[in-house]
Image (cartoon, rainbow, N blue to C red):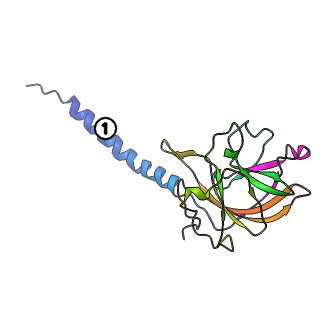
């Protein structure tokens, strides 16, 4: 008597393919979630977006890791692209950080919080949990002050999106020249508020 066995063969084939594929999937997931990051800050110099003579120089910073570090961005028209988080602008006689969400025409989750109580960049362990501390308005840049940036919402892999957090310390504000230097450490993991790399 003839017995039709094709469904069993198909099931065995699928099981064999999944058995071979599953370890590769696990490795891919591990690579995705095992991004290395260190406590070594990256030093950045930006130029005021408010100065016509400085247009074309890097005036904003993209804090979303690419793959592990952010990048300075030249922004000629703030509403032309949303692939940056915070720009440097004139504010009276000094310079300030202005998140992308503070510019007309840009819908961005990017915001900045000024941190009180933390005396060094290395000392700050976590981004504020209170979203009210994050501002989309201009925040004066002061030498020695510590700030936390919440980035715009971006791809986190596997079809999800989220924000990243970074801490920064202002090293130098040269208002007459329209330049600002800071050092920063970025957590590359989506929605993680920790600002100290794992051991």
What residue appears at the point 73 percent right and 67 percent down from the top-left corner?
145
From the viewer's perspective, is 30 left or right of 104? left
**Can you see residue 195?**
yes
- Picture coordinates of residue 98 (x, y %)? 73, 51
Q: Which residues are magenta?
A: 41-62
Q: For this view, does 198 lie left or right of residue 42?
A: left
* Residue 34 is covered by the magenta coloring: no
Q: Which residue is mark 1?
A: 14
Looking at the image, which residue is at 35% across and 43% down?
Answer: 18
Residue 188 visible in the picture = no
Q: Residue furthest left?
A: 1
Is residue 51 toward the left or the right of residue 151 in the image? right
Which quadrant holds the N terminus? Answer: top left
Quarter of image, res 40:
bottom right
Q: Please, which residue is most extreme toward the top here?
A: 2
Residue 56 vertical position relative to residue 142 in the rendered view, above or below? above
In the picture, residue 149 is in which quadrant?
Answer: bottom right
Q: Does dot 1 land on a helix, a strand or a loop?
A: helix
Decide: few, some or many residues near mark 1? Use Cα within 10 Å; few <14, some 14-19, many ≥20: few
Q: Nearer the viewer, residue 94 or 35?
A: 94
- Toward the viewer: 39 or 150? 150
Whether 23 is drawn above or below 2: the answer is below
């Amino acid at each position: 008597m003839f017995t039709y066995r094709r469904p069993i063969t198909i099931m065995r084939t699928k099981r064999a393919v999944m058995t071979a594929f599953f370890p590769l999937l696990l490795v891919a997931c591990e690579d995705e979630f095992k991004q290395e990051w260190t406590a070594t800050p990256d030093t950045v110099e930006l130029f005021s977006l408010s100065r016509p003579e400085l247009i074309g120089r890097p005036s904003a910073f993209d804090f979303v890791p690419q793959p592990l570090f952010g990048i300075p961005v030249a922004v000629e028209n703030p509403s032309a692209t949303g692939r940056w988080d915070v720009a440097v602008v004139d504010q009276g006689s000094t310079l300030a950080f202005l998140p992308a969400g503070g510019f007309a025409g840009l819908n961005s989750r990017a915001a900045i919080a000024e941190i009180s109580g933390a005396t060094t960049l290395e000392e700050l362990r976590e981004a504020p949990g209170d979203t009210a501390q994050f501002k989309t308005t201009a925040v004066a840049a002061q030498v020695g002050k510590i700030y936390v940036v919440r980035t715009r919402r971006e791809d986190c892999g596997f079809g999800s999106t989220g924000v990243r957090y970074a801490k920064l310390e202002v090293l130098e504000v040269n208002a007459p020249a329209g330049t600002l230097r800071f050092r920063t450490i970025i957590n590359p993991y989506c929605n993680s508020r920790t600002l100290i790399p794992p051991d």
